[in-house]
Image: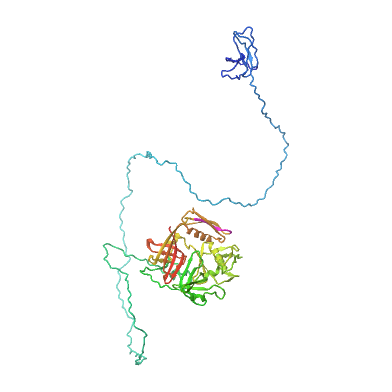
Amino acid sequence: MGDTRSARLVLGPQIDRSGRLVLGDDDGGAPALPDVLIAGAPALPGLGVRAGLLRCAVALAATAALPGMGVRAGGLRYQSNTQRPTVAAAGTAWQVAAAGDGAQASPTHQATAARPAAAQARWQRGRDGAAQVVHPLPAVLAALALPGVAPWQAAQARHEGAAWLHQQALRTALAHLATWQEGQRRHMPVGFGHQDANRMPRAWAAAPWQAGHALRLGYMGHHQGALALHRPGRAPWQEGVPPHAGMSVRPVTPPKPPCYDPATLGRIVFTALADGTGRVVFVCERSTSPEQGVVVPVRRVYIVLNTITLTRVDNGAPLHARGFSASLDVDSWTWQWSAALHESAEPHLARQANGRPPEVLASVNGQPLRLVVERVQRDERFLPQVRFNVSGRGRAAVLASPWAPVLQHGGQATQRTAEQLAAEVLTINNVGIGWGIDWQLPAWTVPAGLWTFSGSYMEALADIASAVGAAIQPHPTDAVLRVMARYPRPPWEWDQLAPDYLLPRDAVQTLGTEFVDKPAYNGVFVGGTQAGGFGPVVRGGTVGDVLAPQATHVLITDPVAQRLRGTAVLADTGRQRRVSLSMQVLPETGLIVPGKLVQVGSGAGAMLGMVRATAIEWARPRLRQIVELEVHDL
C-alpha cells in the first residue's frame, strides 16, 4: 500500500443473512476510501482475521464465534473499478529550422492598369414618415422651489469731489467794419419807343352776292295714325330720410388704370379668335387686376325671345324643327345633338355629292353651331303625321370613326414640339386636310422618332392632349380644334382670377347640388416612359406626403409637360360639388361652354366654379341651357 494515512473505519451493525459482517458507512453505501489502516482493540486468541483487498460494498466475514474480538492493525485497499485510460496526447509538430543563406525573393505581381468603372448608387427617394415621440416625463410635474443666492453685498457709499479746471476769461471787444457806404440817388429818364401811326381811310368790303328768289319745296311723308302705348317705368330711387346724428365719410372709389397707355408700353393682346358674331376678346396686360368678364345685370324680369333655326350648309335649305337638344362636356371633343324635323325636311337629308354626311348650321338665339347629320329616323303617327328624328355630332365628327381612316402617325426624323406634332396629325404626306389647331398650352419639345400612334385623326390628337391632362374643344363653326388645359389655374388660385361670367342668383331658374368626395392628394410622381425626367410634383405650401398614383406618358419629355400633368392630377382632388344651373340663353352670355370660370351671386354667399358640361334643351317656345359647374370647398 502506497499511502498509510491513518483513518478510522466504523463497522456498522450490518450483518447479512449468511452471518457475514458488512462494512459500510453511516448511509448504508459502500465507502469510497483510499488505502486506510484499520486499528483494532486487543487481539483475539485463536482467531485470525485475514486482511484482503476490499472493494466498495465488499463484505469481510469471520468463521468462528467471537467471544470478544479485537482487530489487529492491517492494511486495506479498495478499488473503484473505474478505468481511466489515456484520452489524448499533445505533441509538437515542429523542429528547429536551419538558417538560410539569405536568398533573394522576387514578387510575383505587376502593376495593374487603371480602368474607370461606373458606380451605381442603390438608393431611392425616401418618404417622409411621422414617428411618435414618447415623452418620459410624468403627467403632472411637482413644483420645486430652488433657493436663489445673489452673489452681491451691500456696497459702501463713497464720495468723490469734482473739480472744474477753468478760470474766468477776459472779455475782448472786437471792432466791426462794415464794407458799405451811403449810396447817391440818381434819376434816369424813361423813353417810349413808338410814334403815332398815320390814320388811313378804311378799305371798302364788297360782298359777292345778290338778292335771291324764294323757292318752295314740297315734302310728302308716308305715315298713319299711331297707337298710343303705355310703358311702365321704374325709377331706381327711394324716399330720402334725414341723416342720423354723427359723422360719416363718403366712400372714395379708387381710379382704375387705363387699359391702354402708350406711355407705359401697354399692349392690347387678343386671346381668342373672333366668334360668329364678330366679337374679339382682349385683355389688358399692364392692368394690375384682371378685367371683369361678362356681367349679367340684376333685373326683375328676364325676357328672351328664343329663336332656333336649322339650315343645310351646302344648299341653304331651311329645316323646320319641332325640338332641338345639344350637349358638350370637357371630356368630349365635339357636340352631341338631336332634333325633331318637319316632314318637309325629307328632301334635304340626303348625303352630299362627295358622299359625306350633310352638314347643318344651327343658330341658337343668334349663336351658330355647325353640326353633322349622322343618323336619320322616320317616325309616322296617327292623323297622319310624319316627322324625322335626326341626330349626330359636331363638325369635327369627320375626323373620327367611321368617317376617318386609321393611319400611322408620328415617327418624325427630327425633333418636334408637341404643337407641331398635333398640326402634322392633320396632314397627309405633309399636305393639310383643311383643319387647324388652336394651341393654348405652353410649348415643350419631343425627341425625334419618340412618338408613334396608329388610329384616326382625332384619336391621335386625343393621345397628345392626354399626355398633359389637356382637353380638346371644337370651334363653333370653323374647322379649328382648341387644345387647352383642363385646369388653366388650380382651384386654390381661382379666387385670384376674374370670372368669365358673373351671374346674379336671380338669373338662374333652378340650382341643383351633388357632393363628390375625392382623396386630398398633395403630391404625384410624373414622368415619361422612354425619355425625360421622372419626379414629384407637389402642391405649393404642402409637404407632398399624400401621393396620388403616378402618371406617365411617352410625351412627358420636358419639365413643362411634367408640371402640366401634375397640376391636372392634383387639381381634381378633395371635397367637391357638382352644381347644375338651369337658365335662359341670355344675350349677354350666349352659350356658356366648358372651361369657363363662372361666379354665381356676390358677397359672402358667392359661388365660384369651372364649367364642365353644357346642355341645350328646346321645345318651342321654351329654351334652357343647363350648365354644370365644378366647385371646390377649400
Answer with left or right where residue 129 lies relative to residue 86: left
Q: Please state which of residues 631 and 13 is positioned toward the viewer in this rendering.
A: 13
Residue 537's place in the image compared with 286, above or below, is above
Residue 319 position, x and y percent, is 48, 75
Write down the region rendered in magenta: 523-530
Residue 296 position, x and y percent, is 39, 68
Task: Looking at this view, name the residue that lies furthest to the top.
Answer: 45
Please name the residue shown 48% across and 48% down the image: 130
Main secondary structure along the magenta-highlighted residues = strand
Picture quarter with the N terminus: top right
Q: Magenta stretch containing residue 527, yes or no?
A: yes
Q: How is the image coloured?
A: rainbow
Residue 182 position, x and y percent, is 30, 69
Q: Magenta stretch containing residue 474, yes or no?
A: no
Picture quarter with the C terminus: bottom left
Q: Please state which of residues 582 and 333 is positioned toward the viewer in this rendering.
A: 582
